[in-house]
Amino acid sequence: MYTGYFTAHMSTALRTARSSSLPATLPATGWGFIALYTLAYIGAWLALLTPIMVTLALRVQELVPDRAATALSGVLSVGALFALFGNPLVGRLSDRTTSRWGMRRPWLIAGALGGTASLWIVATAPSIGGVLLGWCLVQLSFNAVLAPLAALLPDQVPQAQRGTVAGIISITTSLGQSSGTGLTQLVSGSMTAMFLVPGLIGVAAILVLAASLSDRRLSPGQREPIRWGDFLRSFWVNPRRHPAFACIWSGRFFMMLGMALMMAYTPFYLQSQLGVATRDVTDVVFHSTLVQCVVSMIAGLASGRISDVTRRRKPFVIGAAVLYGAGALLIALAHSFPMFYLGMALSGVGLGTYLSVDLAFVTDVLPDKENDAAKDLGVFNIASTLPQIVGPLAASLVLVLSQGSYAAVFAAIAVVGVLAALVVVPVRSAK
């Protein structure tokens, strides 16, 4: 679900690249900065995604075992609202920051430290209300990191190197996922450690980048006023005037809805469907996530290259969505670990292929590539963040109708995978 944040990052980067305060040319970026930049991204995903994939579900189950799924749905949905609005808002504030410490550094430091404190709140809160408060602060804090991280691409990297650096950054989500689940496996004896160890490592990486950063500085005279009308309009593109964009937006929404459900409810599925003991959940989630991430990265790199050579995107997007749905169906029907891992691998192939091609696909149908590419990609990113709100609510409904069957949740994921494929079939303006 959070791989779609990369779209928002490119949106912020495109907007910032047009800023008149940027120098006309930038010197070549050294590999030292690129390494620290990559590690900071991995750190941000490590801190933010680990709770979503493993520890938040276990924490909620620890507090309210009799209504864990419903409580988790509420926490994830409300927290996602902070991600939906927090990222673009902090991005705009960052563009207008006139601190003597720079434009991006204050937000990186404040977000990292705030995120650490918020993770501690989630890990130690005595009630679901405390977990909810902490998780909303986690989302807000780490989105205050992700927005300025995105802006560093045009700030620090010249045009000739941006494709290379963006390609490296695009795989940091998968690296953060697999690293986070691995760390929770190592410290699975302590709930607090499962939250704080990935968080502290991630925050350390962010702070190292902030400390070494040669940050841009903006003088008060260069600061543009925030126009809230423009901010609100940035969340909308008319689907009647731009039907191809609307179709691809819908496909991304369904795909990310499936991903949101799979990430959040796999721990509960493992316990109810395959009989995994609570103490072993982190181990199984780690191995299954590792399998999914590895095949996802391989499939993504290969399909992205093939789609460039063939100059065709649509068949890859359709096929990838179907594969993702097939993997989810295999998991829904699984009665053994080999079948479960096979389903995770198949869904990984579909996910990697989809994410590597879908962003290129939508750029072919942007309503105004010359003047509003950043705004339109921001709208496209809503299709990645909105499922974080809708997904838990949809899962709660499926669980009620199926009398608590988590296999039914994965069957629903298979359905939305097929829907993600069907809605892009009418697109004719891009291949």
Image (tube, rainbow, N blue to C red):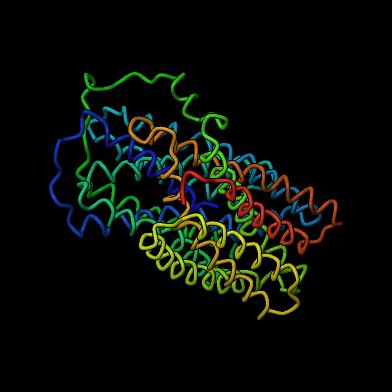
| Quadrant hosting residue 169 | bottom left
Q: Is residue 55 left or right of residue 159?
A: right
Q: Is residue 12 visible in the rendered structure shown here? A: yes
Image coordinates for residue 41, horizontal then vertical, percent: 38, 54
Q: Residue furthest front?
A: 428
Residue depicted at 58% across the width and 49% down the height: 424
User: Nearest the camera: 333 or 213?
Assistant: 333
Q: Is residue 384 visible in the rendered structure shown here? A: no
Residue depicted at 25% across the width and 56% down the height: 34
User: Nearest the camera: 410 or 194?
Assistant: 410
Image coordinates for residue 319, horizontal then vertical, percent: 56, 62
User: Nearest the camera: 238 or 431?
Assistant: 431
Please say if 367 is above or below 411.
above
Image coordinates for residue 104, horizontal then vertical, percent: 30, 38
Please say if 338 is above or below 348.
below
Residue depicted at 58% across the width and 65% down the height: 190
How many circles with numbers are drawn on the protein? 0
| Quadrant hosting residue 275 | bottom right
Please say if 373 is above or below 410.
above
Image coordinates for residue 399, horizontal then vertical, percent: 80, 54
Q: Is residue 194 left or right of residue 112?
A: right
Residue depicted at 15% across the width and 43% down the height: 26
